[in-house]
Amino acid sequence: MEIIIQPTAEAATSVAARVIARLLNEKPNAVIGLATGSTPLLLYRALIDMKLDWSRVTTFNLDEYIGLPKEHPQSYYSFMWDNLFRHTNIAPENVHIPDGNAKDIPGFCAAYEQRIRDAGGIDLQVLGIGTDGHIGFNEPTSSLASRTRIKTLTPQTRQDNARFFASLDEVPTHCITMGIGTIMEARHNLMLAFGANKAHAIAEAVEGPITAINPASILQMHPDAKFCLDADAAGELKRADYYRWVYDNKPEWQHL
Ligand code: GLP
């Protein structure tokens, strides 16, 4: 794991944006996994400002609420088109977002996994983290080998996400999410976390045991996972000074 601690969310985002820009430069037909939530908003703004060529890029989103119409402002479909896709030259047929209104949910989930495989697998997966350590919508005790499937949101996650809805009652109770096994197959994982409310989940994920109670802790087993953190999200890391030292002393050729 590479733990990159920057003073601000903007600085941490700019490291992440450079990682993605470099990938698109090296592989214009890259397959990118994308995340929603407030955390990647700065990243999407930065990528839009970079005016990258998305014409040959394929994307797969991590998750979607079940039961919200696509056009609902809080559907992840609306989120992605409003905050990223419509500001790029991506081909709409290359965009994949789980269909939260699929009639046959298990069938849809199996087909989503197959589409990822057919696209050659995910080159880079963007991740955020829930306050309980969830990645995608893989809540605590999700199987670390899970695949794309239906999940029930925890009361904590519904509460955390209620700020985007008029009331808690409007927050869906179920979702479709890529599994932890799916996420682990991405060639590169890029986690972003900002703010003191993420510090505990990040400390457990990075320095705690690998456990389904903190799904992000599985990234300790990933061969190429980067954590781009602001100082607040890094606030409970015991070895923060060490991570800073490593980053400041990278050989020239490893600079991001
Ligand atoms: C949701 C999303 C996750 C995201 C998390 C954190 O639960 N499914 O992918 O990482 O929220 O959201 P935020 O970035 O708003 O803190």
Image (cartoon, helix red, strand yellow):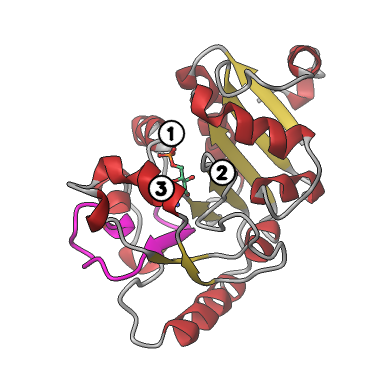
- 92 is within the stretch colored magenta: no
Vertical relation: 195 (above or below) 158 = above
- The verdict on label 3 being within 8 Å of ligand 1 is yes
Residue 86 in picture, x, y percent from top left = 25, 49
Q: CA distance from mark 1 to mark 2?
A: 22 Å
Q: Quadrant of residue 52?
A: top left
Q: Which of the marked residues, 2 or 3, is nearer the chain's N terminus?
A: 3
- 57 is within the stretch colored magenta: yes
Chain part drawn in magenta: 54-77
Q: Which of the marked residues, 3 or 1, is nearer the chain's N terminus?
A: 3
Amino acid under disc 2: Asp
Closer-to-camera residue (110/187): 110
Main SS category, magenta section:
loop
Quarter of the figure with the C terminus = top right
Q: Quadrant of residue 170?
A: bottom left
Number of the label disc, if any, that sits on residue 43? 1
CB of mark 1 within 8 Å of CB of mark 2?
Answer: no
Q: Residues within 10 Å of mark 3 (few under 14, many from 20)?
A: many
The residue shown at (39%, 55%) is: 55
Vertical relation: 167 (above or below) 248 = below
Instruction: Write down the residue under mark 2.
Output: 132
Residue 248 in picture, x, y percent from top left = 75, 12
Residue 194 in picture, x, y percent from top left = 50, 26
Q: Residues within 10 Å of mark 1 (few under 14, many from 20)?
A: many
Instruction: Write down the residue under mark 3.
Output: 36
Amino acid under disc 1: Leu
Quarter of the figure with the N terminus = top right
The residue shown at (48%, 21%) is: 9
Amino acid under disc 3: Thr
The residue shown at (50%, 28%) is: 197
